[in-house]
Amino acid sequence: MIDFLVIGGGIAGLSAGARLSYHGQVTVLEAEEALGYHTSGRSAALFEESYGPPSVVALNRASAAFMRAENGGYLTPRDLMLVGHKDQGDIFERDAVELSMQVIPTAQAFDRVPILNPDTLGFAALSSGAFDIDTDRLLQDFARTIRGNGGDVLTKTKVTAIRKDKHWVAEAGEIYEARVVINAAGPWVDEVAAMAGIAPIGIVPKRRSMARLPAPGGHDVRGWPMMLGAGETWYAKPDAGKLLVSPSEADPVPPHDAYADDMVLAEGLARYEEMVTEPVTRVETNWAGLRSFAPDGILVLGPDPSDPSFVWSAGQGGYGFQTSPAASQLVSNLTTGATSELDPETIAALSPERLRR
C-alpha cells in the first residue's frame, strides 16, 4: 500500500512528492520517458518575487529562502528590464507598478542592452530582484529526495484508470494501491480527475512558444537582463550565449505535446525586432510548452472538497518553478493536516473549494 500516489513527474508532482516523502511512502508516476518532459522542461526559468497575482506573490516570497539557500541555492542573478515603445506610456506605467520595478533613463537601458532601438524605445524600468532558476537541478533534487526517503519515481508509466474502493486503485501497466492521490498531471489534471470520478476544475492549457536565436550582432549577451515588452507582448532572455525570444502568447489548446505555431512565433519575433536594431536572420530552433490555468488564473492546491484523499497540485500557469517550494509545502501540510505558515486568505485563494461554489 502506497501512502501518496503522485500522478505527474513535472515540477508540481516532484516537489509535492518530495515534501510528502517525509510523511509516508511516495510513488510518482510519469507517463513520458523523462521527468519534466512537457511544461516543466520548457520553462523560461525566472524567479521574480513580485511577478503574479497576490496569492502567487505570497508563494514566491515564501519560496525565496529555499531557492536561495537550500542545497547551495538554485538562483543566479538576472535583472529584469521592462521596455516600452514610445506610444506605450500607459501600459508601461501599469506594468512597472505591478512588477514593483524602478523606472530608469533610456540611456541606462541602452548601456545594459546595446541593441535596443533609440527610434522606438520610449520607456524602461529595471528590477534587480530577478534570478535565473536552475530548473534541472531543482527537479532532480526533488526526485532525489523522494528516492532517498524510500519512494519511487517512475517514467514511461501512464495511468489509464483510477477507481476508489476502500482506497485508491490506479492502473498503469500494473496496479498501484494508495491511500491518497496527488493530481499533478499538468494539462491533463481534469482528465485524471474524470477517471477518478472527481469533478473537473476547468483547467485550460495555453500554448507558449519560444525561439532560440544566435547572439544578436555577435554581442556577448550573458550579462544582459531578461527583457519584457510592455503589455507582456514578448520577452527575450539570454541562455547559454544565445537569446531566447517568446511571443508571450497564451492561446488555449487541448492537452498535447505542444509545438510552436509558426505564424504566432513570427508575429512575436516581429514585435521584438521593432524594439531592437539587430534583425532576426536565423532561428536556430523553436519549441512550445503548455501552461495550465484555472478559471481565475490562480494555482489550485489542496484536497478536493468531495474527497479529501484526492489532492490537487494544478493550475501553475507560468508560476510553477518559482512557487514550487512553498506550493509543495502547502500541499503537504493540507494533505497531512499540518499547520501552514501561509496566511488563511492565501490558503483560501489557492484552495480547490473556491472553484466548487
Image (cartoon, helix red, strand yellow):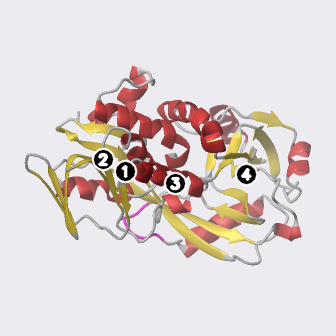
In the displayed structure image, the side of residue 67 where residue 178 appears, left or right: left
- Percent position (x, y) of residue 63? 55, 35
Residue 150, numbered label: 1
Q: Nearer the viewer, mark 1 or mark 4?
A: 1
- Percent position (x, y) of residue 226? 73, 51
Comparing 222 with 331, the one in front is 331
Q: How crowded is mark 4: few (under 14 residues within 10 Å), some or many (20 or more)?
A: many
- Percent position (x, y) of residue 251? 46, 60
Q: Can residue 202 be seen in this view?
A: no
Residue 132, numbered label: none
Q: Which amino acid does label 1 sit on?
A: Gly
Q: How far apart are marks 3 and 1 (CA)?
A: 17 Å
State if disc 2 and disc 4 touch (CB < 8 Å): no
State if disc 2 and disc 1 touch (CB < 8 Å): yes
Q: Which amino acid does label 3 sit on?
A: Leu
Q: How far apart are marks 4 and 3 (CA)?
A: 23 Å
What's the magenta region?
252-258
Residue where numbered disc 4 is placed: 226
Q: What residue type is labelled 4?
A: Met
Q: Is residue 26 visible?
A: yes
Q: Nearer the viewer, mark 1 or mark 2?
A: 1
Which numbered disc, 4 or 2, marks the residue that appears first in the sequence?
2
Residue at 67 percent across and 63 percent down: it is 245
